[in-house]
Image: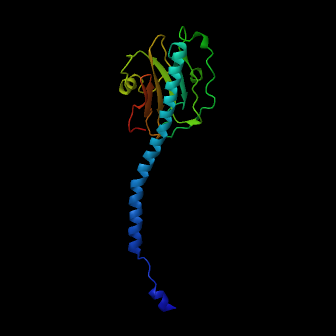
Amino acid sequence: MLKQLKSQKGFTLIELMIVVAIIGILAAIAIPNFLTYQLKSRQAEAKTNLQAIKTSEVAFNAERGCYIGIAPEGVAAVVVNAKPIPFTWGAGLPASGVATVWCSVTTGGVFTDIGFKATGNVMYQYAVNTTLAPAAGYTGPASCATAPVGATGIAILAQNNFVATATANLDGDNTANWQSVWDSSVDHGAYDCTTGIY
């Protein structure tokens, strides 16, 4: 019996320590990359919803003859040192009730007025400002400069464009500013105004 135990082979303590060190190094490399990919995947929400908002605004303009500003809806505000709490969109805010005076007196409303409704929970705050811009060539960087922190729902009659924004602080870092900002306008789809920032 004693002879059998002596003939059994196993790992030495040094070999085990080397394996543990290798696993630790791999984890130190993989975990930050995983977190970055996770935040990047959350930005897909902004891309999808901004495309839908753009389509809804363009359809509204085709039917009524103007773009409308839309008050912010979604995540209420940046929470410093805390990840954002998902906002359940549900049915959205009720219609503003001023549809009879669109494009003549009132040009501000809510997302329900243009027929947009996000599905499920959202991590961004969405809003639309109308704006006066060239008929063509209103690029992402140009529109980002008009609403870098998030739209406020401002609308002025007879403006020929809009900037829809999606703003969030996905990583919940210790800043009071929005970090991830996306926008869309009549001239372009979803555009990342803050590439690589979450």
Q: Which x, y percent locates residue 120? A: 59, 36
The answer to whether residue 177 of the structure is visible from this angle is no
Q: Which x, y percent locates residue 125? A: 51, 30
Q: How many marks?
A: 0
Q: Is residue 134 above or below residue 4?
A: above
The residue sitting at 49% across, 91% down in the picture is 2
Decide which of 193, 139 is in the foreground and name it.
Answer: 139
The residue sitting at 51% across, 25% down in the picture is 55
Q: Quadrant of the C terminus?
A: top left
What's the coloring here? Answer: rainbow
Q: In the rendered view, does 137 fall on the left or right side of 104?
A: left
Q: Which x, y percent locates residue 96? A: 61, 18
The residue sitting at 42% across, 71% down in the picture is 16
Decide which of 29, 112 is in the foreground and name it.
Answer: 112
The residue sitting at 49% across, 89% down in the picture is 4
Q: Is residue 12 above or below residue 94?
A: below
Q: Which x, y percent locates residue 156? A: 48, 12
* Residue 144, quarter of the rendered image: top left
Name the residue furthest top. 104
Q: Is residue 160 above or below residue 92?
A: above
The answer to whether residue 44 of the structure is visible from this angle is yes
